[in-house]
Image (tube, rainbow, N blue to C red):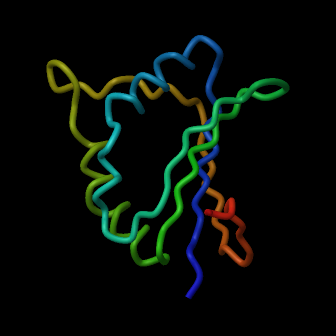
Amino acid sequence: MSSVVKINVLTVPAEQREVLEQRFASRAGTVDSADGFEWFELLRPLEGTDQYLVYTRWRDEASFQAWMEGPMKAAHQHGGEGGERPKPAASGSTLWSFEVVQQAAPKQG
């Protein structure tokens, strides 16, 4: 069975970049213990786009769905100070899904 990759494409206005990165930093480690989780990266655009990529890799689709319906849903439902949810840093979001069919890693030794 092949791993699956989920890339959340977040459109982030320039003035919200720091907010987005701080929010991800403050949640560092929350996905690490999820069953089936394999990899995470937050990719900042260098030029030509205002879209960040949130790259996660999972053992299978079921593992990703369990994360989305459990911890991820809970993290996005709790309010901030005074019970209000903070304004989203991203103005748009698209989820891309891929199956890993080939991979390479540096040779050890």
Give the vertical position of 103 relative to 23 (above or below): below
Q: Is residue 90 left or right of residue 75?
A: right
Q: Report the number of numbered marks.
A: 0
Q: Is residue 50 left or right of residue 35?
A: right
Residue displayed at 39% across by 73% down: 63
Residue 89 or residue 105, whichever sits in front: 105
Give the residue at the far left of this rendering: 82
Give the residue at the far front of this rendering: 109
Q: Residue 8: where, in percent of width, then height?
A: 58, 49
Q: Residue 57: where, in percent of width, then height?
A: 53, 62
Residue displayed at 42% across by 33% down: 24
Question: Which image quarter: residue 4?
Answer: bottom right
Image quarter (top left, top right, bottom left or bottom right) of the C terminus: bottom right
Residue displayed at 64% across by 20% down: 13
Q: Residue 81: where, in percent of width, then height?
A: 18, 19
Q: Residue 49: where, in percent of width, then height?
A: 79, 29
Question: Which image quarter: residue 78?
Answer: top left
Give the residue at the far right of this rendering: 48
Give the residue at the far top of this rendering: 15
Q: Is residue 35 left or right of residue 97?
A: left
Give the vertical position of 51 relative to 39 (above or below): above
Image quarter (top left, top right, bottom left or bottom right) of the N terminus: bottom right
